Image (cartoon, grey):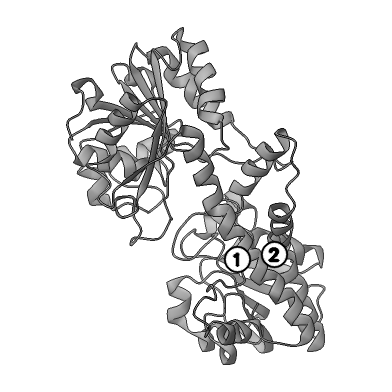
Protein backbone atom coordinates (compact mmCIF):
# COMPACT_ATOMS: atom_id res chain seq x y z
CA UNK A 1 0.00 0.00 0.00
CA UNK A 2 1.54 3.35 -0.99
CA UNK A 3 2.18 5.86 1.75
CA UNK A 4 2.79 9.62 1.63
CA UNK A 5 6.48 10.37 1.33
CA UNK A 6 6.16 12.69 4.32
CA UNK A 7 5.22 9.71 6.54
CA UNK A 8 8.54 7.98 6.02
CA UNK A 9 10.23 9.51 9.10
CA UNK A 10 8.62 8.10 12.24
CA UNK A 11 9.32 8.75 15.90
CA UNK A 12 8.53 6.01 18.40
CA UNK A 13 8.28 7.27 21.97
CA UNK A 14 8.97 4.64 24.60
CA UNK A 15 11.50 1.88 23.89
CA UNK A 16 10.26 -0.83 26.22
CA UNK A 17 8.42 -4.06 25.55
CA UNK A 18 6.06 -2.34 23.11
CA UNK A 19 8.00 0.47 21.48
CA UNK A 20 11.29 -1.26 20.76
CA UNK A 21 9.90 -4.21 18.73
CA UNK A 22 7.71 -1.73 16.85
CA UNK A 23 10.61 0.60 16.07
CA UNK A 24 12.73 -2.30 14.80
CA UNK A 25 9.89 -3.70 12.69
CA UNK A 26 9.23 -0.31 11.10
CA UNK A 27 12.94 0.11 10.37
CA UNK A 28 13.02 -3.32 8.70
CA UNK A 29 10.28 -2.08 6.40
CA UNK A 30 12.37 0.87 5.23
CA UNK A 31 10.93 3.56 7.47
CA UNK A 32 13.33 6.14 8.86
CA UNK A 33 12.82 5.50 12.58
CA UNK A 34 13.87 7.60 15.55
CA UNK A 35 13.41 5.74 18.83
CA UNK A 36 13.05 8.05 21.83
CA UNK A 37 13.16 7.21 25.52
CA UNK A 38 13.66 9.38 28.59
CA UNK A 39 15.76 6.67 30.26
CA UNK A 40 19.38 7.35 29.36
CA UNK A 41 20.40 3.85 30.47
CA UNK A 42 17.93 2.27 28.05
CA UNK A 43 19.13 4.42 25.17
CA UNK A 44 22.75 3.73 26.09
CA UNK A 45 22.14 -0.03 26.03
CA UNK A 46 20.39 0.13 22.67
CA UNK A 47 23.21 2.18 21.19
CA UNK A 48 25.59 -0.54 22.35
CA UNK A 49 23.46 -3.10 20.53
CA UNK A 50 21.40 -4.88 23.18
CA UNK A 51 17.93 -4.71 24.69
CA UNK A 52 18.10 -4.19 28.47
CA UNK A 53 14.78 -6.04 28.82
CA UNK A 54 16.10 -9.10 27.02
CA UNK A 55 13.09 -9.36 24.71
CA UNK A 56 14.86 -8.55 21.44
CA UNK A 57 18.05 -10.22 20.18
CA UNK A 58 21.33 -8.34 20.03
CA UNK A 59 21.48 -8.92 16.29
CA UNK A 60 18.08 -7.28 15.80
CA UNK A 61 19.04 -4.24 17.86
CA UNK A 62 22.57 -3.79 16.59
CA UNK A 63 21.70 -4.49 12.97
CA UNK A 64 18.79 -2.07 12.78
CA UNK A 65 18.82 1.23 10.92
CA UNK A 66 16.74 2.78 13.72
CA UNK A 67 18.43 5.44 15.79
CA UNK A 68 17.99 5.78 19.55
CA UNK A 69 17.94 9.03 21.49
CA UNK A 70 16.93 10.73 24.72
CA UNK A 71 17.33 14.20 23.16
CA UNK A 72 13.94 15.55 22.08
CA UNK A 73 15.61 17.79 19.50
CA UNK A 74 16.24 14.64 17.43
CA UNK A 75 12.48 14.41 16.86
CA UNK A 76 12.59 17.39 14.54
CA UNK A 77 11.64 16.46 11.01
CA UNK A 78 9.39 13.56 11.95
CA UNK A 79 5.83 13.66 10.63
CA UNK A 80 4.50 10.56 12.40
CA UNK A 81 4.75 10.14 16.16
CA UNK A 82 3.83 6.83 17.79
CA UNK A 83 3.40 6.96 21.57
CA UNK A 84 4.09 3.62 23.26
CA UNK A 85 4.60 4.59 26.88
CA UNK A 86 3.31 2.80 30.00
CA UNK A 87 -0.11 3.61 31.42
CA UNK A 88 0.09 2.69 35.11
CA UNK A 89 -2.36 3.31 37.92
CA UNK A 90 -1.97 5.37 41.08
CA UNK A 91 -2.04 4.02 44.61
CA UNK A 92 -5.75 4.90 44.59
CA UNK A 93 -6.27 2.59 41.55
CA UNK A 94 -6.95 5.53 39.22
CA UNK A 95 -5.39 5.93 35.75
CA UNK A 96 -2.04 7.68 35.73
CA UNK A 97 -1.89 9.51 32.41
CA UNK A 98 1.30 11.41 33.24
CA UNK A 99 3.51 9.28 30.96
CA UNK A 100 1.18 10.01 28.03
CA UNK A 101 0.92 13.70 28.86
CA UNK A 102 4.72 13.92 29.17
CA UNK A 103 5.08 12.26 25.77
CA UNK A 104 2.63 14.78 24.28
CA UNK A 105 4.59 17.64 25.81
CA UNK A 106 7.82 16.21 24.38
CA UNK A 107 6.61 15.98 20.80
CA UNK A 108 4.40 19.09 20.70
CA UNK A 109 7.21 21.56 19.81
CA UNK A 110 8.14 19.38 16.81
CA UNK A 111 4.67 18.94 15.35
CA UNK A 112 4.03 20.55 11.99
CA UNK A 113 0.88 21.02 9.97
CA UNK A 114 -0.28 17.55 8.87
CA UNK A 115 1.62 15.61 11.51
CA UNK A 116 0.02 12.38 12.69
CA UNK A 117 0.11 11.14 16.27
CA UNK A 118 -0.74 7.49 16.93
CA UNK A 119 -1.30 6.33 20.50
CA UNK A 120 -0.55 2.66 21.25
CA UNK A 121 -0.82 2.77 25.04
CA UNK A 122 -3.80 1.20 26.80
CA UNK A 123 -6.30 3.87 27.85
CA UNK A 124 -9.97 4.31 28.59
CA UNK A 125 -12.30 5.38 25.76
CA UNK A 126 -11.82 9.07 25.07
CA UNK A 127 -8.19 9.63 26.04
CA UNK A 128 -6.77 9.99 22.52
CA UNK A 129 -9.17 12.72 21.46
CA UNK A 130 -10.17 14.27 24.78
CA UNK A 131 -6.80 14.24 26.58
CA UNK A 132 -4.03 13.88 24.00
CA UNK A 133 -5.66 16.14 21.40
CA UNK A 134 -5.95 19.22 23.66
CA UNK A 135 -2.49 18.61 25.15
CA UNK A 136 -0.88 18.44 21.70
CA UNK A 137 -2.77 21.52 20.53
CA UNK A 138 -1.78 23.53 23.59
CA UNK A 139 1.88 22.62 23.21
CA UNK A 140 2.13 23.14 19.45
CA UNK A 141 -0.32 25.93 18.65
CA UNK A 142 -1.86 23.68 16.01
CA UNK A 143 -5.45 22.52 15.86
CA UNK A 144 -6.02 18.90 16.83
CA UNK A 145 -8.15 17.04 14.30
CA UNK A 146 -7.32 19.44 11.48
CA UNK A 147 -3.62 20.29 11.56
CA UNK A 148 -2.71 17.46 13.90
CA UNK A 149 -4.20 14.12 12.92
CA UNK A 150 -4.96 11.66 15.72
CA UNK A 151 -5.07 7.87 15.54
CA UNK A 152 -5.11 4.90 17.88
CA UNK A 153 -3.68 1.41 17.44
CA UNK A 154 -3.44 -0.51 20.70
CA UNK A 155 -0.46 -2.71 21.41
CA UNK A 156 -0.98 -6.43 21.92
CA UNK A 157 2.49 -7.37 23.11
CA UNK A 158 2.83 -10.43 25.35
CA UNK A 159 6.27 -10.36 27.04
CA UNK A 160 8.12 -13.65 26.83
CA UNK A 161 5.86 -14.98 24.07
CA UNK A 162 7.78 -15.33 20.81
CA UNK A 163 4.88 -17.05 19.07
CA UNK A 164 2.48 -14.14 19.46
CA UNK A 165 4.83 -11.39 18.33
CA UNK A 166 3.63 -8.07 17.01
CA UNK A 167 3.84 -9.30 13.43
CA UNK A 168 1.74 -12.40 14.17
CA UNK A 169 -1.25 -10.81 15.92
CA UNK A 170 -4.06 -8.93 14.17
CA UNK A 171 -3.70 -5.22 14.93
CA UNK A 172 -6.59 -2.82 15.50
CA UNK A 173 -6.30 0.58 13.84
CA UNK A 174 -8.54 3.63 14.16
CA UNK A 175 -8.36 7.32 13.27
CA UNK A 176 -10.34 10.54 13.31
CA UNK A 177 -11.17 10.39 9.63
CA UNK A 178 -10.92 8.07 6.63
CA UNK A 179 -7.90 9.81 5.14
CA UNK A 180 -5.92 9.49 8.36
CA UNK A 181 -6.95 5.85 8.74
CA UNK A 182 -5.53 5.15 5.29
CA UNK A 183 -2.24 6.70 6.39
CA UNK A 184 -2.22 4.53 9.52
CA UNK A 185 -2.91 1.44 7.44
CA UNK A 186 -0.02 2.23 5.12
CA UNK A 187 2.32 2.29 8.11
CA UNK A 188 1.21 -0.89 9.85
CA UNK A 189 0.21 -3.08 6.89
CA UNK A 190 3.80 -3.91 5.84
CA UNK A 191 4.71 -4.72 9.45
CA UNK A 192 1.78 -6.77 10.75
CA UNK A 193 1.60 -9.94 8.67
CA UNK A 194 -1.50 -11.17 10.54
CA UNK A 195 -3.53 -8.27 9.16
CA UNK A 196 -5.31 -5.18 10.40
CA UNK A 197 -8.78 -4.58 11.80
CA UNK A 198 -10.28 -1.18 11.04
CA UNK A 199 -12.36 0.04 13.98
CA UNK A 200 -15.19 2.46 13.30
CA UNK A 201 -13.85 5.06 15.72
CA UNK A 202 -10.94 5.77 18.03
CA UNK A 203 -13.17 5.30 21.09
CA UNK A 204 -14.24 1.87 19.80
CA UNK A 205 -10.60 0.80 19.46
CA UNK A 206 -9.76 2.17 22.91
CA UNK A 207 -12.68 0.25 24.40
CA UNK A 208 -11.74 -2.95 22.58
CA UNK A 209 -8.23 -2.86 24.01
CA UNK A 210 -9.27 -2.18 27.57
CA UNK A 211 -11.78 -5.07 27.65
CA UNK A 212 -9.33 -7.63 26.23
CA UNK A 213 -7.45 -7.86 29.50
CA UNK A 214 -10.49 -7.15 31.66
CA UNK A 215 -12.07 -10.32 30.30
CA UNK A 216 -8.96 -12.35 31.14
CA UNK A 217 -8.81 -10.77 34.59
CA UNK A 218 -12.37 -11.84 35.36
CA UNK A 219 -11.86 -15.37 34.08
CA UNK A 220 -8.79 -15.78 36.26
CA UNK A 221 -10.64 -14.24 39.20
CA UNK A 222 -13.36 -16.85 38.79
CA UNK A 223 -10.96 -19.78 38.99
CA UNK A 224 -9.11 -18.07 41.84
CA UNK A 225 -12.39 -17.95 43.71
CA UNK A 226 -12.92 -21.61 42.87
CA UNK A 227 -9.52 -22.22 44.47
CA UNK A 228 -10.46 -20.31 47.61
CA UNK A 229 -13.63 -22.39 47.93
CA UNK A 230 -12.11 -25.76 47.11
CA UNK A 231 -9.24 -25.29 49.57
CA UNK A 232 -11.84 -25.04 52.31
CA UNK A 233 -13.52 -28.18 51.01
CA UNK A 234 -10.27 -30.12 50.92
CA UNK A 235 -10.43 -30.48 47.13
CA UNK A 236 -7.56 -30.12 44.67
CA UNK A 237 -8.54 -27.23 42.40
CA UNK A 238 -6.47 -28.34 39.42
CA UNK A 239 -8.02 -31.82 39.57
CA UNK A 240 -11.48 -30.25 39.58
CA UNK A 241 -10.58 -28.04 36.63
CA UNK A 242 -9.14 -31.00 34.75
CA UNK A 243 -12.37 -32.93 35.22
CA UNK A 244 -14.54 -29.97 34.22
CA UNK A 245 -12.28 -29.38 31.22
CA UNK A 246 -13.46 -32.59 29.61
CA UNK A 247 -16.54 -30.63 28.50
CA UNK A 248 -15.98 -29.06 25.08
CA UNK A 249 -16.89 -25.49 26.06
CA UNK A 250 -15.22 -25.24 29.48
CA UNK A 251 -12.57 -22.50 29.31
CA UNK A 252 -9.02 -23.58 30.29
CA UNK A 253 -8.17 -20.90 32.87
CA UNK A 254 -6.12 -21.74 35.96
CA UNK A 255 -5.71 -20.04 39.33
CA UNK A 256 -2.67 -17.90 39.97
CA UNK A 257 -1.17 -14.49 40.62
CA UNK A 258 -2.35 -11.68 38.35
CA UNK A 259 0.31 -9.02 37.91
CA UNK A 260 2.05 -7.31 35.04
CA UNK A 261 1.38 -4.15 33.13
CA UNK A 262 -1.94 -5.20 31.56
CA UNK A 263 -4.31 -7.66 33.21
CA UNK A 264 -4.01 -6.26 36.71
CA UNK A 265 -4.09 -2.63 35.54
CA UNK A 266 -6.35 -2.22 32.51
CA UNK A 267 -9.65 -2.96 34.30
CA UNK A 268 -9.16 0.13 36.45
CA UNK A 269 -9.06 2.29 33.33
CA UNK A 270 -12.46 0.99 32.30
CA UNK A 271 -14.00 1.27 35.77
CA UNK A 272 -12.66 4.83 36.12
CA UNK A 273 -14.35 5.85 32.89
CA UNK A 274 -17.55 4.05 33.85
CA UNK A 275 -17.71 5.93 37.15
CA UNK A 276 -17.16 9.20 35.29
CA UNK A 277 -20.30 8.34 33.36
CA UNK A 278 -22.29 7.61 36.53
CA UNK A 279 -22.07 3.83 36.52
CA UNK A 280 -20.39 1.92 39.35
CA UNK A 281 -19.03 -1.40 38.02
CA UNK A 282 -19.59 -4.39 40.28
CA UNK A 283 -18.38 -7.56 38.56
CA UNK A 284 -15.12 -6.04 37.29
CA UNK A 285 -14.14 -4.61 40.67
CA UNK A 286 -15.13 -7.81 42.47
CA UNK A 287 -12.74 -9.72 40.20
CA UNK A 288 -10.00 -7.21 40.93
CA UNK A 289 -10.46 -7.64 44.69
CA UNK A 290 -10.18 -11.42 44.40
CA UNK A 291 -7.06 -11.32 42.26
CA UNK A 292 -5.38 -8.67 44.39
CA UNK A 293 -5.69 -10.83 47.52
CA UNK A 294 -4.10 -13.96 46.06
CA UNK A 295 -0.54 -13.09 47.10
CA UNK A 296 -1.59 -12.75 50.74
CA UNK A 297 -3.63 -15.95 50.40
CA UNK A 298 -0.55 -17.87 49.23
CA UNK A 299 1.46 -16.64 52.20
CA UNK A 300 -1.29 -17.45 54.69
CA UNK A 301 -1.79 -20.93 53.19
CA UNK A 302 1.93 -21.59 53.52
CA UNK A 303 1.99 -20.43 57.14
CA UNK A 304 -0.88 -22.80 58.01
CA UNK A 305 0.91 -25.68 56.31
CA UNK A 306 4.11 -24.92 58.22
CA UNK A 307 2.25 -24.82 61.52
CA UNK A 308 0.62 -28.13 60.58
CA UNK A 309 4.11 -29.64 60.40
CA UNK A 310 5.20 -28.03 63.66
CA UNK A 311 7.56 -25.71 61.82
CA UNK A 312 8.03 -22.51 63.79
CA UNK A 313 6.97 -19.54 61.70
CA UNK A 314 8.72 -16.70 63.49
CA UNK A 315 12.26 -16.58 62.15
CA UNK A 316 11.63 -19.35 59.62
CA UNK A 317 13.50 -19.20 56.32
CA UNK A 318 11.44 -19.29 53.14
CA UNK A 319 12.78 -19.30 49.59
CA UNK A 320 10.67 -17.81 46.81
CA UNK A 321 11.62 -19.05 43.35
CA UNK A 322 10.73 -16.42 40.77
CA UNK A 323 9.80 -12.74 41.07
CA UNK A 324 8.65 -11.65 37.61
CA UNK A 325 4.95 -11.32 36.87
CA UNK A 326 5.03 -14.30 34.49
CA UNK A 327 7.33 -17.08 33.35
CA UNK A 328 10.31 -16.74 31.02
CA UNK A 329 10.56 -12.96 30.94
CA UNK A 330 12.35 -10.29 32.97
CA UNK A 331 9.31 -8.07 33.48
CA UNK A 332 8.63 -7.36 37.17
CA UNK A 333 6.02 -4.64 36.69
CA UNK A 334 3.18 -5.00 39.19
CA UNK A 335 4.38 -8.47 40.19
CA UNK A 336 2.19 -10.04 42.84
CA UNK A 337 5.08 -12.13 44.12
CA UNK A 338 5.91 -8.96 46.04
CA UNK A 339 2.66 -9.44 47.99
CA UNK A 340 3.76 -12.92 49.04
CA UNK A 341 7.09 -11.61 50.28
CA UNK A 342 5.57 -8.72 52.21
CA UNK A 343 2.86 -10.89 53.80
CA UNK A 344 5.44 -13.44 54.94
CA UNK A 345 7.57 -10.63 56.35
CA UNK A 346 4.55 -9.60 58.43
CA UNK A 347 4.74 -13.06 60.05
CA UNK A 348 8.43 -12.39 60.88
CA UNK A 349 9.55 -14.88 58.24
CA UNK A 350 12.99 -14.43 56.67
CA UNK A 351 12.47 -14.41 52.89
CA UNK A 352 15.04 -15.02 50.15
CA UNK A 353 14.15 -14.57 46.48
CA UNK A 354 15.86 -16.21 43.51
CA UNK A 355 15.02 -15.30 39.92
CA UNK A 356 17.53 -16.01 37.12
CA UNK A 357 15.70 -13.57 34.85
CA UNK A 358 16.14 -10.64 37.23
CA UNK A 359 19.30 -11.23 39.23
CA UNK A 360 20.11 -10.69 42.88
CA UNK A 361 21.47 -7.17 42.53
CA UNK A 362 18.36 -5.86 40.80
CA UNK A 363 16.09 -7.66 43.26
CA UNK A 364 17.86 -5.96 46.13
CA UNK A 365 18.34 -2.50 44.64
CA UNK A 366 15.02 -2.04 42.84
CA UNK A 367 12.62 -4.29 44.72
CA UNK A 368 14.02 -4.24 48.24
CA UNK A 369 13.92 -8.00 48.69
CA UNK A 370 16.78 -10.26 49.66
CA UNK A 371 17.81 -11.51 46.24
CA UNK A 372 20.23 -14.41 46.00
CA UNK A 373 22.10 -15.72 42.98
CA UNK A 374 22.37 -19.37 44.03
CA UNK A 375 20.12 -20.82 46.75
CA UNK A 376 21.89 -22.93 49.37
CA UNK A 377 20.60 -26.48 49.73
CA UNK A 378 19.03 -27.81 52.90
CA UNK A 379 18.51 -24.52 54.75
CA UNK A 380 14.89 -23.51 54.08
CA UNK A 381 11.75 -24.33 56.03
CA UNK A 382 9.65 -23.84 52.91
CA UNK A 383 10.15 -23.27 49.18
CA UNK A 384 7.59 -21.44 47.04
CA UNK A 385 7.72 -21.91 43.27
CA UNK A 386 6.02 -18.63 42.41
CA UNK A 387 6.87 -18.39 38.70
CA UNK A 388 7.08 -21.23 36.19
CA UNK A 389 10.40 -20.27 34.61
CA UNK A 390 11.82 -22.93 32.29
CA UNK A 391 14.91 -23.09 34.51
CA UNK A 392 12.78 -24.24 37.45
CA UNK A 393 10.90 -26.78 35.37
CA UNK A 394 14.24 -28.20 34.20
CA UNK A 395 15.49 -28.47 37.77
CA UNK A 396 12.50 -30.57 38.76
CA UNK A 397 10.66 -30.87 42.04
CA UNK A 398 13.25 -33.15 43.68
CA UNK A 399 16.01 -30.57 43.24
CA UNK A 400 13.74 -27.85 44.62
CA UNK A 401 12.84 -30.03 47.61
CA UNK A 402 16.54 -30.45 48.31
CA UNK A 403 16.78 -26.71 48.90
CA UNK A 404 14.65 -27.20 51.98
CA UNK A 405 15.31 -28.95 55.25
CA UNK A 406 13.85 -32.41 55.81
CA UNK A 407 10.09 -31.98 56.10
CA UNK A 408 10.09 -28.53 54.50
CA UNK A 409 6.97 -27.44 52.62
CA UNK A 410 7.12 -27.16 48.81
CA UNK A 411 4.39 -24.84 47.47
CA UNK A 412 4.08 -25.06 43.68
CA UNK A 413 1.72 -22.17 43.00
CA UNK A 414 1.21 -22.89 39.30
CA UNK A 415 1.11 -26.67 39.65
CA UNK A 416 3.92 -27.15 37.15
CA UNK A 417 5.08 -30.39 38.82
CA UNK A 418 1.69 -32.06 39.18
CA UNK A 419 -0.05 -33.12 42.38
CA UNK A 420 2.66 -35.57 43.44
CA UNK A 421 5.48 -33.09 42.83
CA UNK A 422 4.62 -30.69 45.66
CA UNK A 423 2.86 -30.37 49.00
CA UNK A 424 0.70 -27.38 48.06
CA UNK A 425 -0.66 -25.77 44.91
CA UNK A 426 -3.46 -23.32 44.22
Disc 1 from disc 2: Cα separation: 15 Å
Mark found first going from the N terminus, 1 or 2: 2
Instruction: Describe residue 388's horizontal placement relative to residue 413 as left or right.
Output: left
Relative image position of residue 46 (x, y in whole percent): 32, 40
Q: Residue at 59% x, 31% y: name it.
A: 97
- Name the image quarter holding the N terminus: top left
| Relative image position of residue 148 (x, y in whole percent) | 40, 16
What is the crowding at mark 1: few (fewer than 14 residues within 10 Å), some, or many (at least 20)? many
Quick one: SS at disc 1? Answer: strand
Q: Is residue 327 visible to the viewer in this orientation of the structure? A: yes
In the rendered view, would you say 397 is above or below 343? Answer: below
Q: Is label 1 or label 2 in front?
A: 2
Q: Residue beneath label 2, please?
A: 295
Q: Is residue 329 found left or right of 96 in the rendered image? A: left
Please state the horizontal and vertical placement of residue 187, each as a whole percent of the image.
27, 34
Classify mark 2: residues with Cα within 10 Å, few (<14), some (14-19) or many (20+).
many
The reply to whether the C-beta atoms of the residues labelled 1 and 2 are less than 8 Å apart is no
Of 359 and 203, the residue lying toward us: 203
Residue beneath the point at 81% across and 87% down = 308
Q: For the point 80% across and 76% down, which residue is it?
A: 313
Vertical placement of residue 355 versus 242, above or below: above
Q: What kind of element bears circle 2?
A: helix
Task: State the residue position of label 1.
Answer: 353
Amino acid sequence: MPRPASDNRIAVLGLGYVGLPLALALARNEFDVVGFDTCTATVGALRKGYDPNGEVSDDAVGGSTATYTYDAADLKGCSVFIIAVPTPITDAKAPDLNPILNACATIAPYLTDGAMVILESTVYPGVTEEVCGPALAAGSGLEAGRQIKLAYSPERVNPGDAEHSMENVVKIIAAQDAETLTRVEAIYAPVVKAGLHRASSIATAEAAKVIENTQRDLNIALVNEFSLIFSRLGLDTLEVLEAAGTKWNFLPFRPGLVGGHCIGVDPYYLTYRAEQMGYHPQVILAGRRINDQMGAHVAQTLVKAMLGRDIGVRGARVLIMGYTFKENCADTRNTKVADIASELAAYSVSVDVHDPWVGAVKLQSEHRVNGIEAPEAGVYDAVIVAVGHAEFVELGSDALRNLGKPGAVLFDIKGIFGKSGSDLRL
